[in-house]
Amino acid sequence: MMKKPAPFFILAVIAGSCWFAVSAAAADLGEFGQFNGFADARYGARLQSDSYQKQTTLAETRLQLGLFRLGGSSTLQLRTDIYYDDVVEQKSVDLKEGSGWIDLREANLLFSPHSLVDLKVGRQILTWGTGDLLFINDLFPKDWQAFFIGRDVEYLKAPSDAVLISLFPGWFNIDIAYTPRFDPDRYIRGERLSYWNPGLNRIAGRDAVVSPSTPDRWFSDDEIAVRLTKNISGYETALYFYDGYWKSPVGFDPLAATALFPRLSVYGASLRGNLGPGVANLEIGYYDSRHDRSGDDPFLPNSEWRFLAGYEQEVVRNVTLAGQYYLEALQRYDAYESTASAATARDPYRHLVTLRLTWLMLNQNLNLSLFCYYSPTDEDIYLRPALKYKLTDAWQLSAGANIFYGRYDHTFFAQFNQNTNLYTGVRYSF
Amino acid sequence: MPLKLVFTLCTIFLLIASGALGALTAEQIVSQANQASYYAGKDGRANVKMTITDKNGGTRNREFTILRLNGQKGDQKFYVYFRAPADVHQMVFLVWKNIERDDDRWLWLPALNLQKRIAPGDKRTSFVGSDFLYEDVSGRGIDEDRHELVEEKEDYYLIKSVPKDPSSVEFTWFQTWIDKETFLPKRAEYYQRNGNRYREVEAVKIETVGGFPTVTIAEARDLNSGSVTRNSFSEIEYNIGLQERIFTERFLRRPPREISR
């Protein structure tokens, strides 16, 4: 794809103001700082053979180095991973994908140009919304690959290269995250995990690695995410807006025969607070698939309503139980159905329930957990049992599994059927 | 009879009847102890070094900074910033302690940039895996127990407290030695149904900081497991002018400079 250079004067103004702000903030840093990190080694393998993949799902050693400086009115955060991955062919360094041997997690400066304004500039992890491992209004990049192979759950969030502007005028707060160049998810592309390929109408893997056309022009292929929040005596309310692209290549360009990221806008709201002995949350979002509003283009996704309701409670001392109900309601279903393949067409509603059980033992040094996704409409299931044991303050052992099962090959979790895996890891933190 | 005189007589009568001339009731003592322990000043900060020693002598360490702000009618806000161990570094535990409803609690997970809401849950669970409980950190509601003055000596009051809702707690009763001069609890012992003493909390060292008598070393012992946790407080300050906005998501994302001492 052609790269259109951004207009010179915009870059000059931005660079100039950034330089001014950064140098002012840097002069202020240095009162308080911490250096930390960890070394982590992990191994995981499939429990069954997969004709499109290696038996090994995870074989990596990783060193994370972090630097945190806190000044009077600014903070600096640097955090990077240096790693060796033995499963996927070694590639050249790509900071956006985190591939090669370096994954820059954070490199940002946060400062306050005004007492009611915070600016956070640079590579950062962004998160909002109320779901537990389900996301409606959080359209910041996720790393599904890391999630499905047993890296620590923090790797589910991939970094954004963005400017986060936060305004605190008083009776509510506004956050605006501007990403000048689209940051897609680190989606399942077939090189490590096999997936359902609708073009081939079968499960595929390394024989059909997805290489979509990714919007990558600075300042025109951009994303904006806005959140308004207000805490009303402990009840957190929020309104959301997003304008950008579907985060995975869910569209297809039949002329170029490539997968693509269709345009997307999302409008949503959420509520979270104490209810009875636990915490309840509600979230809703309308996914406006802007290039297929009529729903009749078979190569682009239709618009959807998404809804989430959750509840979490400590049921017995040290045992927490949490459940969520999640719904995707496809719009213009008649138009969708008339063009979709009858064998793999989805239902107008996709229902999903999740259950999380967490059990802390041995003075909270042993954490046993089970997270379960189950969709009665897709008739598929995804189980995440996990164990973490803190041997000492520095050493931690972990083990777990990612178990996929379903009736049909093409549904969301069932397509990963052949990727069911077991993993174990050891981490030394410093 | 002039109204003023009626009031005066009534007041005198009530004072005599309640024994308030000199002696304090158990509730008054507990209330003053609660003030002295958890509400000193308008706000405060402290660095805490926590050492958990198990019965085999193995130790685990935690380091954190606590910021506290007093609100209206006994409500308070706490900001607990973790420095160590390395795997919890930069995490923040935020509590809005509410007297008339359940507390609001959040955990900030820096690697995920996530403000995780925690179920109000059981306040008698261990705080960060130590022998201190959440309730030891933020205080136990004084109306949750029936208090009785068991003994009064020259330098202390001994109070026996029995929970009004026994099913909500793991003890059957506890007794507290409260210093008459500072009103700080010097020692508390917790008993189970079978009469076994199974838990102790002790103020090992008390110093006066900024005019407020302050526990600077505290120890909690679990007599069943043999585990002991010692908290050493340093860099203690009161009335530092903490602003309420510190106790919000904004300052989870960017810790306030008040933690950096």
Image (spheres, coloured by chain):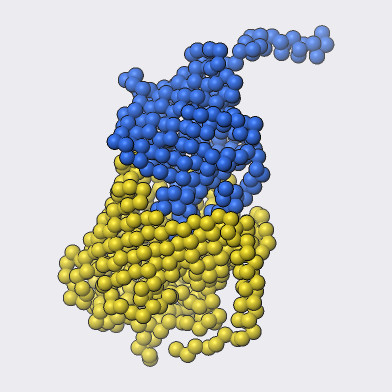
How many numbered discs sit on the rendered protein? 0
In the image, residue A333 above or below residue A311: below
Name which residue lies at 32% across and 76% down.
A189
Q: Colour of chain B?
A: blue
Q: Which chain is yellow?
A: A
Please state which of residues B32 and A328 is positioned toward the viewer in this rendering: B32
Residue closest to the eye, B97 or A161: A161
> Relative to residue A101, is residue B182 drawn left or right?
right
Residue A227 appears in which quarter of the rendering?
Answer: bottom right
| Location of the N terminus of chain A (image quadrant) | bottom left
Q: Which residue is drawn at the image coordinates 46% and 45% (left, top)?
A: B63
Q: How far from the left and from the top, in percent, is residue A317?
A: 36, 38
Residue A389 in the image: x percent, y percent? Answer: 30, 49
Image vertical order of residue B43 relative to residue A220, above or below = above
Q: Is residue B116 visible?
A: no
Can residue B216 be seen from the camera position used here? Answer: yes
Give B211 or B160, whichever is nearer the viewer.
B211
Quadrant occupied by the C terminus of chain A: bottom left
Q: Is residue A35 left or right of residue A29?
A: left
| Side (left or right) of B198 relative to B67 | left
Q: Residue at x 37, y 69 (%)?
A: A82
Task: From the viewer's perspective, tell me whether residue B171 is left or right of residue A377.
Answer: right
In the rendering, at what x and y percent does residue A171 appear?
A: 65, 54
Q: Residue B82 location in percent, x, y? A: 47, 48
In the displayed structure, B118 sits above or below B145; it is: below
